[in-house]
Structure formats: C-alpha cells, structure tokens
C-alpha cells in the first residue's frame, strides 16, 4: 500500500459506519410500508418508477460487472467485450419485450408478489409455483458471489481479512432488508446506482492518464495489450468463455434471458401504473448502459499497468489504488460496495419472499393450521414472519458457503442464474406468446430444463456453463411444447369419452 494511503482505512471505516447508519435509517423508514407481505415484497407504488428503473440497473450490475467481468478482461482481453456489449443491448432488448405483458399478467388474480406466484397464477398451478420457488433457491450461489466480491475488494484495497469482509456485507444487508423490505431495498439501490454510475464513468475517464494517448487512448490500449500477448486483442480467446462463435451465442442467450430472473422481474411488479412502465424501462436502459460498459476498460488497463496480479478478480480494486488519489479511492470503494450490496439485497429479498409466499404459504400453512380458521390478516402476518426469519437463515448459509474463495467470481455467479433460467425461460416466454401453453407443459419444462442443466454441469458433459444453459433451455422449450400439446390431446380424448358416455 502506498504511503499516502495511510488515511485510507480510517476514512473508509468512517464511511462504512455512515453507510450502515443510513441504510438502517432507510430500513426503519421503509418499515411503515413493510407491515404486510405485499408491502414487504414489492412496496408497489411507493417508489417513483425512475428510481425503480435505476434500482433495476443497480441490481443487475453486481460484483460480477464491477469485479468478475473486468477480471475476465484482465485475463482474456478484448474478447470480453462480447459480454459487456450484450449486458446492455441484449438484456435491455429482453426487458423491452417482456415488461408490458409481464406487468399485465402480474395484476390478475389479485396480483403477484413473486415470479413463482406469477407463474402459478398464469398456469393455475400451485405445483408449478412451488417448483419455481425451489429453483429460486439457486440464487444462493449469486449471493455467495457478491459476498466473495465484497471480501476480495476489502482485502485488496484496505487489508481487511477475507472472512471479515464477508461478515460485514452479510450483516449490513440483512439489517436494512429485514427492517424496510422492498422500499428500503429499491430506494437504497436507486441511490447506490447513481454512485455506481459515477464510479463507472471515472474508471473509464481514468484511461486518459493511466494508458494515455489522448483521443487515441483505445488505439494505445490495444497496442499495449498486443505487446503483452497478441491473444489479448483477438476477437476470440483460447481457454476462456469466449473461445468460439457458439460460446458467444450462448452468452448472449444468457444475457437476453437474464432479465427474467426473479430479483429483476419483481421490479416490474413494483410499478403501480402501466403508463409508468415507459419511464421505468428508459431509466433501466440508461442504467444498464452506464453500469455495464465502462468498468471493463479498467480491467483491460489493469493488465497493462499491473501485470501479474495473484487474482484476476482483484483487477479493479488494484487499479483504483494505482490510478486515483486517496479521497477518490475511498469514494470509489464505496461505489464498489454499492455495486455489490445493491444486488445482494435484491437477491436476499427475492429468495426470502419466495420462501415465505410460495413455499411456507402453499406447503406449510395448510399443514400447520389445518384446524384453525385464520383470517387473511393473520395468514399474511405469519407468512411475513416466515419470510423475515428465512432472511437470517439464508444470510448464515451464504456466509458459510462464502468461506471458500472460488476460482472465478463471474463463473460462480453465472452458475445459479443459469440453473434458474434453464427452468423458467420457456414457461414465461411461451406463457404469453403461445396460446397452447398450459400447466402440464410448464411443469415439464421447469423440471426438464433445470435437471438437464444440473446433469450437464455436475457430470462435466458440457463444461462451459453458458453452453450448458443454452442446451438446457432448448430442452425446456421442447418439453414445454411437447407437454402442452400432449396434455391438450389427453384432455380432448377425455372430453370426447365423457360425451360418448352421456350420449349412450
């Protein structure tokens, strides 16, 4: 650590204390809206659609885009831009295509609080709701990825031990989410997303003095990378995620489908009026662009000015230490903390809402209170309590799972999301694009898609995570179509048989 950074640790500690006080205050303020399950899960209509849009971008960005993907850029070079470009363009396209109809379906049957409930209402199937809720639990890997990212940053920048960094992140997030629910999560993410945007732009602009070259900074960067290794400026990379055209196509499919993840689509259900969806999607698109495009260039620059880092995922923290004065280092560290916690809180909220609303309400309540006539208010209170209790449990599980540092932060976060997408992409997309879609096909798709993904990755049949997700999604579509058509045929035959019996 440079001598002039001796003030960095106390400065950041003070800012962390301030951050904890602020989020706790925000959580207490949000508690006014989180006295019911609906308020805790969505805070629908309580936050401006523009803030919800920024929150969407902040929840999307995560440690993956600020640490994992720049780590790829540090290792594989310019080929990583295939991922970065897709994060904005392809994901936003998916958001534009899915948002309006998803919102409309979400208002039916009294409204949906979670993605599993949305699917359960759409196909009139509690079984499907429970299956998707179980699938949502795979997001625990995504949470672990955020924990690892936060701990890596603390360790690299200010020397806080890895374990302590994880504990700090888990503790802060659980406190304000449990207090304020969706309101605290969305408002904090909106503010954090703004801070993250400033950090992204500063990382991009810093190339002017770390790499140099003035208006030709990109040409200079490319020349420097080529001098290190010509493979760093090739459109495809050897041994990495971008080694072939099909591998890149699989990644684009992931990024297109990424918008369907529960912690992101819940933001759509938060918007109160249909006319506000335009503001939401516009601000979400701007946030996606700023937060996903710029930071990767700092990862490339780090390869030039900081060769030989022990961990590629530490490229951005190490670059910040090299490129900025102490005051800006502290501010940018807080921006990176925002990037991590803004996704972590969304994930915690999404998982715990599914545990309470989709598992506890559907499976446990009928057994625990079968002889009691609970009022709707009493039932809602018990489900809300179950959600908040599960928040602490999930936090402890993620803490334990984070103790072992993964080889690649980006691959770890992609593992859980790919499992979820493999199961839900066909039921959601065909759910309002194809009139023959029914619950039999949807259940078959969720089971087959997720099972195929687990088989391919656990056996090593397909080692590339994104390709495994692509193949598994295709299997999900096949089973969705075949299962729906077969169910229609069976139903039609049963109806004809009943009519034949009636007519004698």
Image: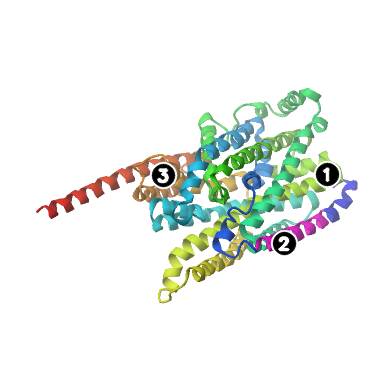
The residue that disc 3 covers is 431
Of the image marks 1 and 2, the number of the one nearer the N terminus:
2
Rendered position, 125 above or below 376: above
Rendered position, 477 above or below 342: above
Of the image marks 2 and 3, the number of the one nearer the N terminus:
2
Seen in the image, is 499 located left or right of residue 393?
A: left
Measuring from the top left, give residue 504's x and y in whole percent.
Answer: 9, 54
> Camera-side residue: 204 or 76?
204
Mark 2: few/some/many CA within 10 Å (<14, 14-19, 20+): many
The residue that disc 2 covers is 24
User: Where does the magenta region start and end?
Assistant: 12-31
> Camera-side residue: 463 or 47?
47
The residue that disc 1 covers is 328
Q: Element at badge 1?
A: helix
Coloration of the structure image: rainbow
Seen in the image, is 457 located left or right of residue 499?
A: right
Residues at marks 1 and 3, CA–CA distance in whole angstroms: 48 Å
Measuring from the top left, give residue 296's x and y in whole percent.
Answer: 69, 36
Rendered position, 236 above or below 358: above
């Amino acid at each position: 650590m440079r001598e002039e950074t001796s003030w960095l640790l106390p400065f950041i500690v003070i800012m962390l204390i301030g951050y904890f006080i602020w989020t706790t205050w925000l959580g207490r303020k949000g508690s006014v809206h989180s006295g019911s399950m609906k308020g805790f899960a969505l805070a629908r209509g309580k936050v401006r659609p523009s803030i919800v849009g920024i929150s969407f971008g902040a929840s999307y960005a995560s440690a993956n885009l600020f640490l994992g993907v720049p780590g790829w850029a540090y290792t594989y070079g310019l080929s990583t831009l295939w991922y970065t470009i897709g994060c904005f363009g392809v994901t936003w396209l998916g958001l534009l295509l899915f948002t309006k109809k998803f919102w409309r379906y979400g208002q039916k049957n009294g409204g949906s609080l979670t993605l599993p409930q949305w699917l359960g209402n759409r196909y009139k199937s509690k079984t499907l709701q429970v299956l998707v809720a179980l699938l949502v639990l795979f997001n625990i890997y995504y949470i672990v990825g955020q924990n690892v990212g936060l701990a890596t940053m603390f360790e690299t920048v200010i020397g806080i031990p890895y374990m302590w960094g994880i504990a700090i992140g888990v503790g802060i997030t659980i406190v304000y989410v449990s207090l304020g629910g969706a309101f605290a999560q969305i408002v904090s993410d909106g503010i954090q997303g703004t801070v993250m945007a400033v950090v992204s732009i500063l990382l991009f602009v810093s190339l002017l003095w770390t790499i140099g070259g003035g208006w030709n900074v990109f040409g200079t960067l490319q020349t420097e990378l080529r001098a290190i290794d010509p493979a760093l400026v090739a459109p495809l990379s050897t041994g990495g995620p971008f080694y072939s055209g099909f591998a890149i196509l699989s990644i684009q499919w992931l990024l297109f489908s990424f918008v369907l993840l529960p912690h992101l689509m819940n933001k759509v259900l938060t918007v109160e009026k249909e006319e506000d969806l335009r503001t939401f999607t516009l601000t979400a698109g701007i946030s996606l662009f700023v937060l996903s495009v710029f930071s990767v260039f700092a990862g490339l620059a780090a390869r030039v000015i900081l060769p030989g880092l022990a961990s590629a995922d530490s490229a951005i923290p190490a670059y910040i230490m090299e490129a900025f004065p102490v005051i800006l280092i502290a501010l940018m560290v807080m921006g990176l903390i925002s990037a991590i916690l803004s996704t972590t809180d969304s994930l915690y909220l999404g998982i715990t809402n599914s545990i309470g609303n989709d598992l506890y309400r559907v499976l446990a309540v009928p057994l625990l209170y079968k002889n009691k006539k609970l009022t709707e208010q009493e039932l809602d209170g018990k489900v809300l309590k179950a959600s908040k209790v599960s928040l602490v449990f999930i936090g402890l599980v993620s803490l334990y799972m984070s103790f072992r540092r993964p080889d690649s932060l980006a691959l770890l976060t992609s593992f859980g999301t790919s499992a979820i997408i493999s199961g839900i992409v066909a039921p959601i997309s065909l759910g309002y694009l194809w009139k023959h879609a029914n619950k039999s096909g949807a259940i078959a798709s969720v089971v087959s898609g997720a099972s195929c993904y687990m088989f391919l990755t656990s056996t090593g049949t397909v080692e590339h995570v994104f390709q495994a997700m692509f193949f598994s999604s295709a299997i999900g579509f096949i089973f969705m179509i075949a299962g729906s058509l077969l169910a229609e045929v069976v139903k039609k035959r049963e109806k004809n048989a009943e009519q034949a019996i009636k007519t004698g």
